[in-house]
Image: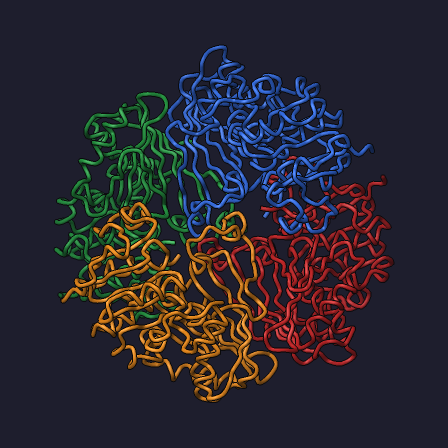
Chain colours: A green, B blue, C orange, D red
Amino acid sequence: MTQHRIAILGASGYTGAELVRLIATHPAMKIVALSADRKAGMAMDQVFPFLRHLDLPVLQKIDEIDFSGVDLCFCALPHATTQVVVNALPRNLKIVDLSADFRLRDPAEYEKWYGQPHTAVELQREAVYGLTEFYRDEIKTARLVAGTGCNAATGQFALRPLISAGVIDLDNILIDLKAGVSGAGRSLKENLLHAELSGGTHTYSMGGKHRHLGEFDQEFSKIAGRPVQVRFSPHLLPMNRGILATVYVKADPQVVHATLAKAYAAEPFLKVLPFGALPSTRDIAGSNFCHLGVIGDRVPGHAVVVAVLDNLTKGSSGQAIQNANLMLGIEETAGLMLAPVFP
Amino acid sequence: MTQHRIAILGASGYTGAELVRLIATHPAMKIVALSADRKAGMAMDQVFPFLRHLDLPVLQKIDEIDFSGVDLCFCALPHATTQVVVNALPRNLKIVDLSADFRLRDPAEYEKWYGQPHTAVELQREAVYGLTEFYRDEIKTARLVAGTGCNAATGQFALRPLISAGVIDLDNILIDLKAGVSGAGRSLKENLLHAELSGGTHTYSMGGKHRHLGEFDQEFSKIAGRPVQVRFSPHLLPMNRGILATVYVKADPQVVHATLAKAYAAEPFLKVLPFGALPSTRDIAGSNFCHLGVIGDRVPGHAVVVAVLDNLTKGSSGQAIQNANLMLGIEETAGLMLAPVFP
Amino acid sequence: MTQHRIAILGASGYTGAELVRLIATHPAMKIVALSADRKAGMAMDQVFPFLRHLDLPVLQKIDEIDFSGVDLCFCALPHATTQVVVNALPRNLKIVDLSADFRLRDPAEYEKWYGQPHTAVELQREAVYGLTEFYRDEIKTARLVAGTGCNAATGQFALRPLISAGVIDLDNILIDLKAGVSGAGRSLKENLLHAELSGGTHTYSMGGKHRHLGEFDQEFSKIAGRPVQVRFSPHLLPMNRGILATVYVKADPQVVHATLAKAYAAEPFLKVLPFGALPSTRDIAGSNFCHLGVIGDRVPGHAVVVAVLDNLTKGSSGQAIQNANLMLGIEETAGLMLAPVFP
Amino acid sequence: MTQHRIAILGASGYTGAELVRLIATHPAMKIVALSADRKAGMAMDQVFPFLRHLDLPVLQKIDEIDFSGVDLCFCALPHATTQVVVNALPRNLKIVDLSADFRLRDPAEYEKWYGQPHTAVELQREAVYGLTEFYRDEIKTARLVAGTGCNAATGQFALRPLISAGVIDLDNILIDLKAGVSGAGRSLKENLLHAELSGGTHTYSMGGKHRHLGEFDQEFSKIAGRPVQVRFSPHLLPMNRGILATVYVKADPQVVHATLAKAYAAEPFLKVLPFGALPSTRDIAGSNFCHLGVIGDRVPGHAVVVAVLDNLTKGSSGQAIQNANLMLGIEETAGLMLAPVFP
């Protein structure tokens, strides 16, 4: 099979490492360059010993990479940095970006949520939103795809078909989300230490402050054809991988279930459970699957949708490869059918 | 100080062991009898090695205990069993029960939630509901106090003052609750195994099926003077101790905060954080404290209350001792000011 | 590629599920039958929701399986049961057994460690010991291969080349082993509950009582040509997957390192780190790799070897597939090059 | 009861917070000053929300504290900084130091293990080693007590009576130690992140590099009257509190057990289990107890001692209070009989 030549910028973070993990058994991708600014010169297994068995390029600075030999570039850099870097890359290079920099279409919204003006507005306009199942056609022909936020992906898988079908009250949507810690990256923060985080439940960015709200607003309003503002309460849990979104909607539970089941019937990665059954994050950890369940609440006319996915896989790096597969003309599921790891 | 003589029935479970842990440094209680049916004859440190340093009575069968030498009896047995056992105890014995058997006033409600008719209706009528901060006067003179459910306590600490003050919409109350695993007891269930539970988020008893809803209905309806039905979604998390309830109400957030702050200003165990600050279960693990925080949601007119407590302490055994203190005429906080354990 | 038809007996346990996980992306195996005695009639995803995305046969009783359509059978049943079941299978069926029943050559040793006489001595004699890297040639032509104990595999990877090369003192070998909880299976035992196990360190089967000592004795004595008795202290840790063996030997550390490095230079799954670097279980979780490190102790003439592997993969089900690959004439690494999952 | 006035320097670290936790229910100590250099001006509950229920002094810089009103000062600062700070404190102030700065008697040994010359050699000479059970008389009259390393304490509780009694081979002592993460402090290091540490086993400072070896050498050689060098292999585990030391000795196991049982028969905090029973870290977490067990190995003449304690309590802050009690003429166990927290 043709081996597409892949570069990964920002390979020393968790999403970068997850890309390497997945590409390791991908039948049609070959890593030809890895960048990590502060760790340039190091071998990848010094940064991530779990990749020791692989034969990988040494980490480089971005400007040392010869992009002429690259077919597609994954960019796993922090936001703000990303727009500068991507702006400087060759214009014909296919790029799947995993940062927040190209997710929002409206420069004003970007500035509102990220606190600074966008410096590559043209690229922002060009980018296709990377929620594969809903942007497949655009992604196939895109040059620049913007991976979604991991929480944003989870909430959208639960809600998009319901908004499209007009079966829920748009003014009564609440997402109570439980997120694993790898979503915060390999960053040295006190609240991410084992001693602080393990064995407990914490809230974070509650009260309408979480940046993924920008994506919810953009996408849900677009589908609904009117402004939609969901409520969104994230919690940080002692799990390394996984997001569970408990989504509360005002709707007929059976209709909710039927709508999701129909919408995702042919999707290889989205699985809707029988009515009343609810998934756990342990069911999907390490994989590109998203499981969804629906139950009726005791108060008639209210339903609860529970969606789970692995933030590092379906929520970022797996999604990125799924998009790259489409952009490269490969089978969409290539390299992504790995089963979850349990226990 | 006078040493009140204490018996604990059901000492081989987690709430029984927690009673022993707390009484170990209580200035005015002395354990004179411990029961555990199947483990009768064993020493307590064979069942719970962490109590090895204490000089404790050998485990007995209940009918081997001489209750004439007992001032107060904690009953930490399963529901249904409890009503039979308590019915057979001396009628002048002070009892703090930790089971579900005497929490509900209405025999029909008991049968609805617990699946069988109550067999000690007279005792059910006699029992005082054990949420100390709201039933202090009745508890002081009670003979039989019914400890609350741990989830029920958490939700009520967040909501009772708001319902009393009439500051929230009674038809829009939602409790998304995150519970630690010790609340399920020392029971051999597959879903409680480390290999199954750790590192993930699970739902349980969702869709209006959790039995603590019986307590919510009873208490909230009583305060409101009309039927109140909250929605309640419990999740099981990889933490041994602690409950975090994220409580969604339709109300002015500042009013919610002011109402809670005022209601609990003089309470030794209930701490309301400054507006906008939210607690974590790690802040109260191992202690009898309940911390509460309030934040406004992005959609005006909606507030989120976050309440945390330790299910084994403030949610059951600590609450039980607090009640016993009142019943015995001891300082309410005696033996209960232990600081949480962190990290 | 030819799809070899696979049956798995005992599919409702962790090693059975791990076989399914690995075969899910194996290029040359197809599962045609799954057995689980008490769960016969259930779908696999009712027992293991993480396998929901796969199209798998319904669970059957063993005697309902038509073995004429099976090329190779994995047997993941408890010991003692296994010898009865395997004895009743067709004599021409290729079998990879994951239990302890065929690991020991000497019936007396089996009885000593497992407490009852062996009832299928002929099969015991026929079976080839399944430590692939050391029994490759025998495995290729074997009909019945006995998978090793997971702890036994870890210790042997650290020690076999050292004993063969005669570079360590045979009377001073100590293995202090740290094991994850999935090694104990999906069994309902109090000590395996999250509430009991998490956040702590426990010992188990210490003082020469662990059954894998039978394998150590058999194999090390055979290599050494004289009786060898290692000391072995297992500990149970709050991790779901992984074993770390800290192996203490009296030897020149550099020689120890060189001996291991040379022995495993061409092995696809065994990786020897640079001298002085030591692996963690997190480096190999979810994969078929075993990493080994060597360091010198402060007391000259003493070395420490640290070996890590995933008990469910390289320690049992991955090893089983590696052996099956050889028995079926497939590439040895087929389906097994999945990277570890981190974080 | 007289309230002794206490200052804590370095109150923003874990050992500082643990001192506050324990003093919160101490009958004869009152905290009058707390220092934290970079967090001066903050309230303690901003740094440690779990202490929210306490009425504590605001954090200060050290030079803002009026030591004339202080009876005893706990110093929980990093090593090297400590010697400078303590040197500048009033010479009549009673001090319990929790750092490594005054543990070693020999300035050359200090420099060897800590990489720089000691700058307060006179204080080093004055300090009494703080392993209470073995230095009680000296501690009672000491002005400056040097708390032991937490690993060093664990190993010494297992070994000191055995060395004193001459019942073990001094040239064959091996300590394989499993340590919880709070021992590393509240420091922002990648290997301490939840995502890196949880669910796995890591080694650290192996091969004779751990600094607590300096204490082992000093103390064991002093008792033995000849140089003793133990081997010591520390492992870092996913538990917040607790150390389990598996100590391998060449000796008669029954004699080992009898020696420890006799040595600790009257000790309030040291509990020797029946022969063959071994403790877990879960048995002592959150408490000042140390449990010890002894078992015979399969190779005759070898014994294994397993000792467990909580690194933050008996291993540092609890030990410090035990010493302070002696220095202040209070009951040695005052404030320290809190039961462990389980589950």
Q: Is residue A302 above or below residue B288?
A: above
Residue A8 lies, in percent from the top left, at 28, 60
Q: Is residue A44 left or right of residue B310?
A: left
In percent of the image, x 23 and y 30: which residue is there? A162
Residue D122 lies, in percent from the top left, at 80, 67
Among the 4 quarters of the image, the one containing residue D215: bottom right
Q: Is residue A342 visible?
A: yes
Q: Is residue A257 left or right of residue A14?
A: left
Among the 4 quarters of the image, the one containing residue A247: top left
Q: Relative to the observer, which residue lies in front, A115 or C280?
A: C280
Q: Relative to the observer, which residue lies in front, A82 or D228?
A: D228
* Number of marks in the rendered image: 0
Q: Is residue D220 above or below residue A212?
A: below
Residue most toward the top? B225
Q: Is residue B177 left or right of residue A162?
A: right
What quarter of the picture does the N terminus of chain C occupy? bottom left
Residue B96 lies, in percent from the top left, at 65, 28
Q: Relative to the observer, which residue lies in front, C337 or B99?
A: B99
What quarter of the picture does the C terminus of chain C occupy? bottom left
Q: Relative to the observer, which residue lies in front, D88 or D24?
A: D24
Q: Is residue B296 visible?
A: no
Residue A135 lies, in percent from the top left, at 17, 42
Q: Is residue B142 above or below residue D156?
A: above
